[in-house]
Amino acid sequence: MSVVTIKNDMREKAFRICRDYLNGIWKFIAPQEMVLKQVSGGLSNFLYYCALPAGAKPKQGEPSRVLVRFYGQIHSEGALEAILTESVIFTLLSERKLGPRLYGVFPGGRLEEFIPARPLKTKELTDPEISSIIGEKMAQIHTLDVPISKEPTWLWDTLGKWMNNLNQVVKTGLNDEKEVLLSTLMSGWQLDTEMEWMRQYLEQLKSPVVFCHNDLQEGNILIREKAASREEKLVIIDFEYCSYNYRGFDVANHFCESVYDYTNDKSPKFFVNEANMPSIQQKMHFIRSYLDTMQREVGSNDAMKANLSEERLFREADCYLLASHFFWGLWSVVNAPVSTIPFGYWEYAETRFTAYFQHKKYLLNKYGAAINDDIAF
């Protein structure tokens, strides 16, 4: 965490929130004694690390350090709805010990647990023990009953919105060599037509609709420096893309992340190694951990038990790799002209769409245009 100059009024505000919501020893220290560091700041969120001074010991089990999150300016009803939804999701995951603990919600932000941890490394996603725990965590997330719309509209609505944005960008003209090159490729790919084909193809699977994280990559999984138990070893964060969605997408998307490593310091800021895609054995190790946990979670729910087949889930994940490649390829194209983040968006888009068409060919050879239930992995 980098230390930046923080105005006294922000110190007073952060301190008042910690004092009022945490109580205990926090009520007996002065604002200037509190350790305060700005962790991040931008248009959407400002995050501050707040800690007790050296020598101040918790009195009633209150935390000695926390994160205070202030939301940025809210300019639309949609942004307000997104914040409310994320707050509800954060609360539920906190109660189930699937995410950071929630210490308080206040007008304009929330008070969160500070977790001494680091994000996973890409290569750790297929570590047998870690993969098994991630499978358990994903299953627990998938069984949550979240009070938001349970219609699986997120995937196709998001892709449709991005496709409209893309078509608008192409109409207004491209002024970058990479944009022109990719525009030519996209014209040959016929993405509008391709997206509709993919929708009809994947609908055959009838993948169960569950509450999904939708972005369970290594950067969104923290591993604690010291964990009291296996359950506490990993913590899931970043719920920006959470929604009710198809189970197959969440599993497939997680498998894809083993291929893409975002630690490259040089352009295009990512590495690709297709050989790192989990093997059949590694995928089945994850799936068995997921299904064992799901079996315990659903109990006597016969309707959900019917979907707990290893072969069925493997097939769903195998086919929904298409949607993962398409989703992040289109995401990259839409962000490329507007993002200020130094990342090779055009290169990433080309990588993901190339992978999409390669996998499509593989699936059609393996399953055919009609996905039959009697085809094993």
Image (cartoon, rainbow, N blue to C red):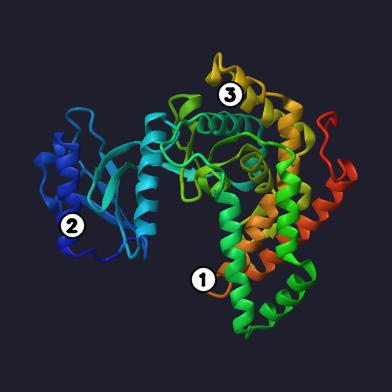
Q: From the viewer's perspective, is 119 left or right of 182?
A: left
Q: Residue at x 77, y 52 (%)?
A: 274
Which SS class for mark 3?
helix
Place of residue 284 in the rendered image (x, y in percent of width and height, measured from the top left):
73, 30
Disc 1: which residue: 339
Q: Amino acid at mark 3?
A: Met
Would you identify the image quadrant in which residue 202 lies?
top right
Q: Residue at x 19, y 60 (%)?
A: 10
Q: Amino acid at mark 2?
A: Arg
Which SS class for mark 1?
loop
Report how far apart the C-alphas of labels 2 and 1 lie in the structure. 31 Å
Place of residue 78 in the rendered image (x, y in percent of width and height, measured from the top left):
39, 58
Q: Which dot, 2 or 3, sits closer to the camera? A: 3
Q: Are marks 1 and 3 in contact (CB under 8 Å)?
A: no
Q: In this rendered view, identify the residue nearer to me: 145 or 140.
A: 145
Q: From the viewer's perspective, is 102 left or right of 176?
A: left
Q: In this rendered view, identify the residue nearer to me: 4 or 149.
A: 149
Q: Which dot, 1 or 3, sits closer to the camera? A: 3
Closer to the N terminus: mark 2 or mark 1? 2
Q: Residues within 10 Å of mark 1 (few under 14, many from 20)?
A: few
- Residue 294's label in the rendered image is 3
Closer to the N terminus: mark 2 or mark 3? 2
- Residue 136's label in the rendered image is none
Q: Residue at x 53, y 42 (%)?
A: 151
Disc 2: which residue: 11
